[in-house]
């Protein structure tokens, strides 16, 4: 009873803080504003990538910039933006923040259940995972990617169609999941898991159909925005971009060499692993996928939270110190809290750090989780 009361008070406190702290001005200068402005355009049956119109909506809400802040996602992500366009900027910001917080809370709980509902409060560390906190502060959709991936992990055996359908959330940023998606396709073919494929394809097809109904010219408009908005000249703190800059700044195709190498590695690894587990090998695969992505922001790394919690539980059950995780998480947390801008090289080290920590924990003696919900199988 006390836990339920505490949870209720926490939710009420969060709602109050969001309702009174998120002024229209603060909401307008977060990443959230790009989704809201695109949603407004879609609701009015207009081009969601129209620079002057987007800037007009954003400045009317209190945006301080002089250049339009585009929604970078392709039209298949319109289903996330349209509901925001039905609301005013402050109401949309509050609702969006609550949705992101709910995604994080549900993902933490599902990960805890997959670990066998261990006693203690170690799972609460997930709420302080620096990329997840960065998503909440910026209003970024990385926590929706996290929920899609976590639901897939939780249901991929017992409710495969739902697990596949949940991946529509991950399709909002498909470049983060290229090796992961390739191995998932091979795994489904090997195991004849047609329901996962059916769930994924039907949900993604529905998102594409909705995009077409909202804006039949959306894909050409998106391509025009990408080619004219100067996105390729932005400093995105990803290893693939640095790889390109070190060799030849103008050769954009160089950014896809790391992810191509990761895809080849993933195919080889999968072919040599007959007893594949998404809750073991799949977590490492996702870490490599995000690290090798053609471009990624620190907020995108929120999807890695289950891998960090699984590694932390491995440390706890092996009687090891949490110091290795603190060495990675504390500096990143300080960067987020003190407002280090995401378009700086100060976040280049984070994905290698998460991967290194996971590999360290994975070397420890394995354990068998309690057979609770959706026990993993091959």
Image: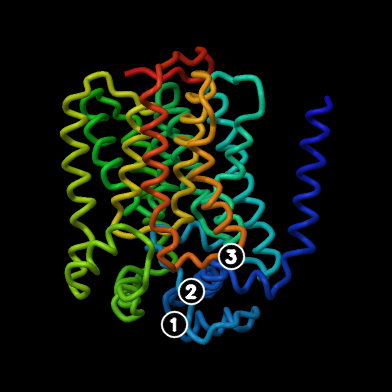
Write the residue at 27% across / 19% down.
275
User: Which of the two residues, 175 or 193, is positioned nearer the viewer here?
Assistant: 175
- Disc 1 versus disc 2: distance between alpha carbons? 15 Å
Say whether disc 2 or disc 3 marks the residue closer to the N-terminus. 2
- Disc 2 versus disc 3: distance between alpha carbons? 36 Å
User: Which of the two residues, 53 or 16, is positioned nearer the viewer here?
Assistant: 16
Report the quarter where the N terminus lies.
top right
Tag count in the figure?
3
Query: What is the number of the mark on residue 45?
Result: 2
What crowding class fits label 3: few (fewer than 14 Cα within 10 Å), some (14-19), or many (20 or more)? few
- Disc 3 versus disc 1: distance between alpha carbons? 27 Å
* Percent position of residue 44, x then y: 53, 75
Report the quarter where the C terminus lies.
top left
Q: Is residue 197 left or right of residue 97?
A: left
* Percent position of residue 79, x then y: 48, 57
Q: Is residue 43 left or right of residue 245?
A: right
User: Which of the two residues, 286 or 154, is positioned nearer the viewer here?
Assistant: 286
Write the residue at 30% across / 53% down.
293
Instruction: Please determine whether, in this image, residue 138 is positioned above or below residue 158.
Output: below
Say whether disc 3 or disc 1 marks the residue closer to the N-terminus. 1
Query: Could you tell me which secondary element the residue under label 2 belongs to?
Result: loop
Write the residue at 77% across / 42% down.
10
């Amino acid at each position: 009873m006390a836990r339920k009361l505490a949870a209720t008070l926490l939710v009420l406190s969060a709602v109050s803080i969001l309702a009174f702290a998120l002024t229209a001005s603060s909401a307008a200068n977060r990443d959230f504003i790009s989704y809201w402005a695109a949603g407004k355009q879609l609701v009015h049956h207009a081009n969601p990538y129209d620079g002057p119109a987007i800037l007009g909506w954003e400045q009317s809400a209190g945006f301080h910039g002089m250049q339009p802040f585009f929604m970078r996602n392709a039209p298949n992500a319109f289903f996330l933006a349209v509901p925001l366009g039905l609301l005013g900027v402050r109401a949309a910001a509050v609702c969006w923040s609550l949705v992101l917080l709910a995604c994080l809370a549900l993902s933490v709980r599902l990960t805890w259940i997959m670990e066998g509902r261990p006693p203690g409060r170690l799972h609460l560390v997930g709420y302080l995972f620096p990329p997840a906190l960065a998503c909440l502060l910026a209003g970024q959709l990385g926590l929706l990617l996290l929920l899609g991936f976590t639901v897939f992990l939780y249901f991929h055996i017992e409710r495969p169609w739902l697990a596949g359908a949940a991946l529509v959330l991950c399709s909002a940023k498909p470049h983060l999941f290229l090796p992961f998606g390739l191995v998932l396709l091979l795994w489904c073919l090997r195991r004849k898991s047609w329901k996962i494929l059916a769930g994924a394809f039907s949900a993604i097809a529905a998102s594409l159909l909705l995009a077409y109904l909202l804006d039949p010219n959306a894909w050409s408009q998106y391509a025009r925005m990408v080619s004219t908005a100067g996105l390729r000249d932005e400093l995105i703190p990803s290893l693939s971009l640095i790889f390109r800059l070190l060799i030849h700044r103008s050769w954009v195709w160089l950014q896809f060499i790391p992810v191509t190498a990761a895809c080849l590695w993933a195919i080889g690894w999968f072919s040599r692993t007959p007893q594949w587990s998404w809750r073991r090998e799949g977590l490492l695969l996702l870490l490599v996928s995000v690290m090798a992505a053609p471009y990624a922001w620190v907020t995108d790394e929120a999807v890695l939270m289950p891998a960090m919690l699984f590694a932390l539980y491995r440390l706890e059950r092996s009687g090891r110190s949490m110091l290795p995780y603190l060495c990675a998480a504390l500096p990143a947390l300080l960067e987020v809290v003190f407002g280090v801008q995401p378009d700086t090289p100060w976040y280049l080290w984070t994905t290698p750090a998460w991967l290194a920590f996971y590999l360290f924990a994975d070397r420890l003696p394995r354990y068998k989780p309690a057979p609770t919900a959706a026990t993993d199988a091959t």
